[in-house]
Amino acid sequence: MSADYIWAVIAGMAVANFAVRFVPVAVISRIDLPTPIMRWLRFVPVSVMGSLIALEVLRPGGEYQAPWDGAHLPAALVSMIVYRLTKSFMGASVAGVVAFIVLRGIIG
């Protein structure tokens, strides 16, 4: 494979990804949606983030393990507590990463 081919594939994937994500948002942003649908849509980002994090907490490295065997669950709990107290996504993320690094050093 040539470098030009690889760059063309990357550019094509970028355009397709942009089109798939941008077009629906652009169309929906111009429409006045009913209140129940707007309320429902507010939960989509939280649901997606929760499912991604739950998968990593419960299946670190792609293998199921007991939650108390590693630093993943305690670090997630630290992150949840920090978010609950501060309502800061960035603060909770940093606290979770720091807690994970510290706990991994302690727990192993």
Image (cartoon, rainbow, N blue to C red):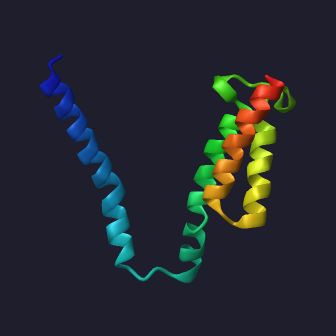
Q: Where is residue 11 in the image (x, y as percent from the top left)?
A: 21, 40
In this view, the residue farthest toward the top is 1
The answer to which image quadrant residue 87 occupies is bottom right
Can you see residue 71? no
Towards the viewer: 17 or 70: 70
Towards the viewer: 67 or 38: 67
| Direction from residue 30 to residue 103 in the image, left or right | right
Q: Where is residue 37 in the image (x, y as percent from the top left)?
A: 54, 74
Q: Which residue is drawn at 82% across and 27% down?
A: 106
Quadrant the N terminus occupies: top left
Q: Residue at x 76, y 54 (%)?
A: 80
24 shown above or below 28 = above
Q: Which residue is drawn at 73% across and 50% down?
A: 79
The answer to which image quadrant residue 12 occupies is top left
Q: How many labels does the image show?
A: 0
Can you see residue 35? yes
Towards the viewer: 49 or 85: 85
Q: Where is residue 2 in the image (x, y as percent from the top left)?
A: 14, 19
